[in-house]
Image (cartoon, rainbow, N blue to C red):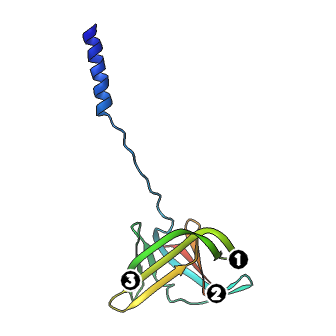
């Protein structure tokens, strides 16, 4: 009986020591990761908006999970980076309303060393809706609003 008890204890101890727990850290993918096209841009305030052409409407922005980014259209291919962060402070939403609180800020910096073309977008606020997002920037006079949809 003692040998069975010892064998059972050794077996249970061996199973316990040989089995292990695995901790998996899952980092949620950023809502900006993926390919996007800018489908409109406008400037204004809560009283009205005027559309404007940025020259970026014919290209595709691709943001990768490692923070790198590309922009490609028929004439240029740019590489760079993107960064999104949660900040606290004042910002304008897509309707031109001013808020003070926690929100997402988005930076997108791209360049082409051959053509010396560059894109520097520093959005004060970015709101994500699944397959689209709207980003705003206050230029000191008016609010610039950019709408993107998944490509």
Q: Residue visible at 32% across and 34% down?
A: 19
Q: Position of residue 76 (x, y in %)?
A: 39, 87
Question: Which picture quadrant has residue 144?
Answer: bottom right
Q: Which residue is mark 1?
A: 97
Dividing the picture into quadrants, the one containing residue 82 is bottom left
Secondary structure at badge 3 equals strand
Question: How far is the residue under mark 1 from the one under mark 2?
Answer: 13 Å
Mark with earlier residue (2, 3) = 2
Q: Along the horizontal axis of the image, is 133 left or right of 111?
A: right
Instruction: Tell me the crowding category of disc 3: few under 14, some 14 to 19, or many 20 or more residues within 10 angstroms, Cα based.
Output: many
Which quadrant of the structure image shows residue 81? bottom left
| SS at mark 1 in the image | loop
Residue 3 higher or lower than 54, as above or below: above
Report which residue position mark 2 lands on.
Answer: 43
Specify few, some or many for label 2: CA neighbours under 10 Å numbering under 14, 14-19, or 20 or more: many
Q: Residues within 10 Å of mark 1 (few under 14, many from 20)?
A: few
What secondary structure is found at the residue carrying circle 2? strand
**Quick one: label 3 or label 1, which is nearer the N terminus?**
3
What whole-number distance in Å separates the C-alpha atoms at marks 2 and 3? Answer: 25 Å
Q: Which residue is found at the position 60% from the left and 87% from the top?
A: 139
* Residue that protrudes farthest toward the right in the picture: 47
Q: What is the x, y in percent for residue 79?
A: 37, 80
Q: Earlier in the sequence, mark 1 or mark 2?
A: 2
Q: Is residue 52 left or right of residue 80?
A: right
Identity of the residue drawn at 64% across and 75% down: 90
Q: CA distance from mark 3 to mark 1?
A: 33 Å
Q: Is residue 72 left or right of residue 16?
A: right
The picture places residue 8, in percent across and down from the top left corner, at 30, 17
Nearer the observer, 77 or 136: 136
Residue depicted at x 42% and y 51%: 25
């Amino acid at each position: 009986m003692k040998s069975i008890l010892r064998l059972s204890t050794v077996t249970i101890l061996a199973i316990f020591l040989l089995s292990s727990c695995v901790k998996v850290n899952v980092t949620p993918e950023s809502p900006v990761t993926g390919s996007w096209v800018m489908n409109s841009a406008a400037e204004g305030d809560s009283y009205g908006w005027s559309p404007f052409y940025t020259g970026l409407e014919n290209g595709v922005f691709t943001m990768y999970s490692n923070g790198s980014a590309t922009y490609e259209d028929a004439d240029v291919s740019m590489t760079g980076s993107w960064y999104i962060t949660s900040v606290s402070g004042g910002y304008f939403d897509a309707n031109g309303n001013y808020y003070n609180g926690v929100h997402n800020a988005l930076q997108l910096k791209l360049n082409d060393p051959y053509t010396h073309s560059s894109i520097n977008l520093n959005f004060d606020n970015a709101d994500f809706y699944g397959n689209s997002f709207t980003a705003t920037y206050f230029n000191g006079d008016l609010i610039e609003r950019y709408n993107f949809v998944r490509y």
